[in-house]
Amino acid sequence: MPLAIRAIPCLSDNYIWLLRDEATGAVAVCDPGEAGPAAAALREGGGRLDLILLTHHHGDHVGGVEELKRAFGGQVVGNEADARRLPPLDVAVRPGGTVEFGDSRAEVIDTPGHTRGHIAFNFKGGDVLLCGDTLFSLGCGRLLEGTAAEMFRSLQALNALPGETLVCCGHEYTESNARFALSVDGGNAALRAMAEAAAALRRDGKPTVPTTLAREREANPFLRAPDAARLAELRSAKDSFR
């Protein structure tokens, strides 16, 4: 595999994603909500850091950026349109553009909905999608700044990627998402299987992600929503689900 990926738990339920380009040894982290866990992983790997990729401006995704940059260097990459709310950017990107990372290349995808400036990074060939808080295993992000129509378009843009694409999201939400998903689509065998697998992984203290787009297409009610109106209904119901 051109890219080696690792989920690094941080804060209460966040993940920092550590990527290594196998051909060149280049190293990146995505959405470092705090510095300590990422710094420990980087030191284990020799201390190299080339890129710090940011999907959106929330503190639990950018809180460790400045400390990591001071300690290891690395260029901070984020959405030019949201630069005023992000840590200082070394590389300002736009949706439709690309990010070079060793011998790998990521396409920048516009994914508003959770925040207006949210983007995702899709490493073609490596089939790795860094999607922040847009798409979760069995869920999607809250509509904090955007609309259901924007989130629907964002999810459909991600859904157009190959089924084997690894979905590397920003939080460990799968078990809670599964409980809601089962309440609206309890007859879905693929969903039941994913819920059982997630529970087993968490009992063993293991991450439930990355998932794949193929699995999400079968089981994620938000990705399966036929239109923005249904997505809005689901998101509203999830927001008040207990």
Image: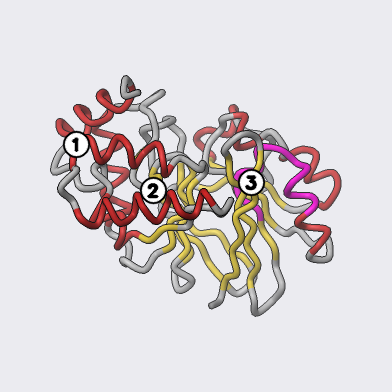
Q: Looking at the image, tell me whether mark 3 or mark 1 is earlier in sequence order.
A: 3
Amino acid beneath label 2: Ser
Q: Earlier in the sequence, mark 2 or mark 3?
A: 3
Mark in front: 3 vs 1: 1
Q: Is residue 8 left or right of residue 185?
A: right
Mark identifier at residue 184: 1
> Does residue 85 appear to the left or right of 191 in the view shown?
right
Left or right of 2 in this view: 26: right
Viewed as shown, does residue 70 lie left or right of 53? right
- State the separation of the CA atoms marked 1 and 2: 16 Å
Instruction: Name the secondary structure under disc 2.
Output: loop
Callout 1: helix, strand or loop? helix
The answer to whether 144 is drawn above or below residue 154 in the figure is above
Tell me the tag on residue 137.
2
Identify the magenta region.
Answer: 29-40
Q: Label 3 amino acid? A: Pro
Q: Nearer the viewer, residue 161 or 178?
A: 178
Of callouts 1 and 2, the N-terminal one: 2
Point out which mark residue 236 bears: none
Q: Would you call the spot at circle 1 few (<14 residues within 10 Å), some (14-19), or many (20 or more)?
A: few
- Which residue in the rendered view is the most extreme toward the top? 240
> Label 1 near label 3: C-beta < 8 Å?
no
Q: Are the residues at dot 2 and dot 3 in contact (C-beta closer than 8 Å)?
A: no
Whole-percent x and y of residue 230? 15, 33
Q: Residues within 10 Å of mark 3 (few under 14, many from 20)?
A: many
Report which quarter residue 19 is drawn in: bottom right
